[in-house]
């Protein structure tokens, strides 16, 4: 049986675990304070709007609140259309931020974001090169 997400739930994109549950997606992703607060606020809203929903996905709407299915890609695109960047850019930024926070570990990135080995290495190489350039400028 699924339990509704709570304010203290942890997020990894669109998958949830609950306090006391085992994290099954590998190493737990890190969240900055701003993101953690945004998710916490959204969870408060979501619980008020759909108090009985057992949908395990972070984002739900009136069509998915009573099911366990994810919102459609077109719904998600419509949600972010007014933003200056798209979902692909947000995901790329999140992956780079995770690489910086965890020492550019390609296995960690591959596990957390379901990346292939070559893709994971591209992200960690980009972070390592950026860090090296930053260090050379500060000398």
Image: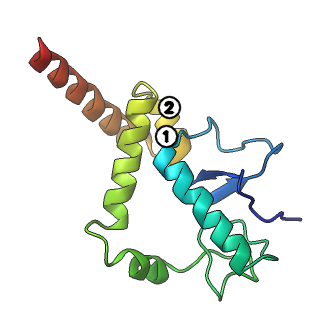
- Judging by the rendered image, the residue that carries numbered circle 2 is 107
Q: Residue at x 89, y 65 (%)?
A: 1
Q: The residue tagged with tag 2: helix, strand or loop? A: helix
Q: Position of residue 132 (x, y in %)?
A: 20, 20
Neighbor class of circle 1 (other Cα within 10 Å; few <14, some 14-19, many 20+) is some
Q: The residue tagged with tag 1: helix, strand or loop? A: helix
Indicate whether 122 appears above or below 129: below
Proximity of marks 1 and 2: CB atoms separated by less than 8 Å: yes
Q: Residue at x 31, y 59 (%)?
A: 89
- Judging by the rendered image, the residue that carries numbered circle 1 is 110
Q: Quadrant of residue 128?
A: top left
Distance Cα–Cα, label 1 vs label 2? 5 Å
Q: Position of residue 101 (x, y in %)?
A: 43, 31
- Left or right: 26, with 3 as reference point: left
- Left or right: 116, with 64 as reference point: left
Neighbor class of circle 2 (other Cα within 10 Å; few <14, some 14-19, many 20+) is some
Indicate whether 134 appears above or below 81: above
Does residue 109 show up?
yes
């Amino acid at each position: 049986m699924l339990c509704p997400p709570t304010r203290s739930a942890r997020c990894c994109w669109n998958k949830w675990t609950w306090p006391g549950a085992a994290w099954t997606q590998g190493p737990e992703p890190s969240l900055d304070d701003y993101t953690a607060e945004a998710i916490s606020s959204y969870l408060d809203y979501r619980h008020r709007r759909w108090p009985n929903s057992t949908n395990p996905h972070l984002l739900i709407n009136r069509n998915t609140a009573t099911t366990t299915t994810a919102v459609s890609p077109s719904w998600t695109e419509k949600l972010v259309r007014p933003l200056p960047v798209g979902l692909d850019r947000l995901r790329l930024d999140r992956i780079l931020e995770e690489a910086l926070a965890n020492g550019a570990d390609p296995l960690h990135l591959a596990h957390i974001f379901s990346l292939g080995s070559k893709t994971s290495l591209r992200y960690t190489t980009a972070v390592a090169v950026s860090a090296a350039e930053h260090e050379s400028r500060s000398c």
